[in-house]
Amino acid sequence: MLHSFVEKTNIPILTTMNAVDLAQGNLHIGFIGTHGNRVANMILNECDLIISVGARLGIRQVGRTTSKFAPKADLVRCDIDEYELSRNIKDDEKKYQTDARDFMRMLLDEEVPNYSAWKSQCLEAKEILKDYDKQPGNMAVEKISSMLPENPVVSVDVGMNQCWCAQSLVLRGKKGRIHISGGYGIMGCGLPYAIGSCISAGNQPSYCITGDGGFQMNIQELETVKRENLPIKIFILNNRVLGKISETQHFDNDDRFAATTKESGYTVPEFSRIAEAYGIRGVKLRNYDELERYKEWIVDKMPCLFDIPLPENSLLTPKIKFETQMIRPELDSSVINIVNEILRR
């Protein structure tokens, strides 16, 4: 129904992290919030109307100072939860307590103009910014994306890998799913999610993208994968540190690392050898481009594990303060001006 509305109106779709699989392929613009795609947050600053369907719009999306959230936009909110609607994001917002499906049906019945010109502006801005903020983790996720079949089911763990996937994991097709733990924030969820997804889909291949820290929290579930012969493909983005925490210790605590790096008490095993001990194919790659050598592994009916190295100092970019101000990294003002001019036409 969402796709029908977008195809009718050409209104760009921005999502929250939990909903990144709602808009895939050429419908995908980006997700908003603290580690959201830069272009998505810049579009929020320039748009004149937001229709929010089932999005909580919590502090990671709107910031602490809500007056700075989409300052030029009117806000229409739909949510089935009256308690979510009980707080205001904007004083003059319009609220509808109803099921998202019913709300979308009402929108489809409305005479809504075609916003192709505005969507073109957004896509033009996205093209200009496509190579900014890109980290090795983003490039690894893009490589994985390119090798997945159409309409895959991907389970994502918690940590830097989660944010890189929300930013850069774009699926082909309209029926694929990305399972993210969202507000639960439970490191170690990736492999159990993938096991459940695989079994519920009749033992069809499912995909797990995880970090070295999260994977170690439920590594024993490899025995379940082997015992049940589940065709789960595991991609470990391995930077050998507890990334999100060590990043905070780096930027906010003057590199006073504690239990997040090798020197401060955190280490990782040889994951491919552990996989082999469980009777599962495993390989330690030199870089993510080596995935090309294992195309058959990614689509066959047997489990496997890829240990993909990343630099220890991998970062999450961009980063936004709770005051909804971009803080990392800063772009050249000329680039910002060009993008803003495109969005203000």
Image (cartoon, helix red, strand yellow):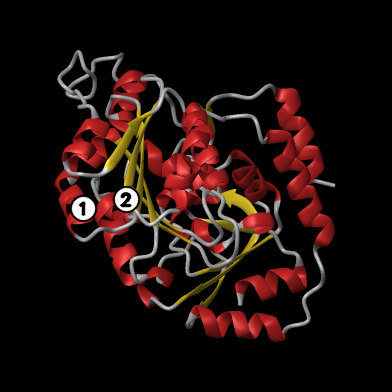
Quarter-of-image position of residue 143: top right
Q: Position of residue 142 (x, y in %)?
A: 55, 40
Inspect this view and state whether residue 89 appears: yes
Residue at 40% x, 71% y is 86
Q: Position of residue 41 (x, y in %)?
A: 59, 45
Count of marks overlaid on the render: 2
82 sits to left or right of 4: left
Work out whether 321 lies above or below 55.
above
Classify mark 1: helix, strand or loop: helix
The amino acid type found where label 2 is placed reads Pro
The crowd level at tag 2 (other Cα within 10 Å; few <14, some 14-19, many 20+) is many
Q: Which mark is residue 213?
A: none
* 1 or 210: nearer the viewer: 210
- CA gap between label 2 and label 1 equals 8 Å
Q: Quadrant of the N terminus?
A: bottom right
The crowd level at tag 1 (other Cα within 10 Å; few <14, some 14-19, many 20+) is some
Q: Which residue is mark 1?
A: 226
Work out whether 217 lies above or below 51.
above
Upstream in sequence: badge 2 or badge 1: 1
* 236 or 95: nearer the viewer: 236
Quarter-of-image position of residue 172: bottom right
The amino acid type found where label 1 is placed reads Lys
Q: Which residue is mark 2?
A: 303
338 sits to left or right of 183: right
Q: Check contact, mark 2 vs mark 1: CB within 8 A.
A: yes
* 208 or 44: nearer the viewer: 208
Work out whether 241 lies above or below 71.
above
Inspect this view and state whether residue 36 appears: no
Classify mark 2: helix, strand or loop: loop
Q: Position of residue 102 (x, y in %)?
A: 54, 85
Residue at 59% x, 60% y is 23
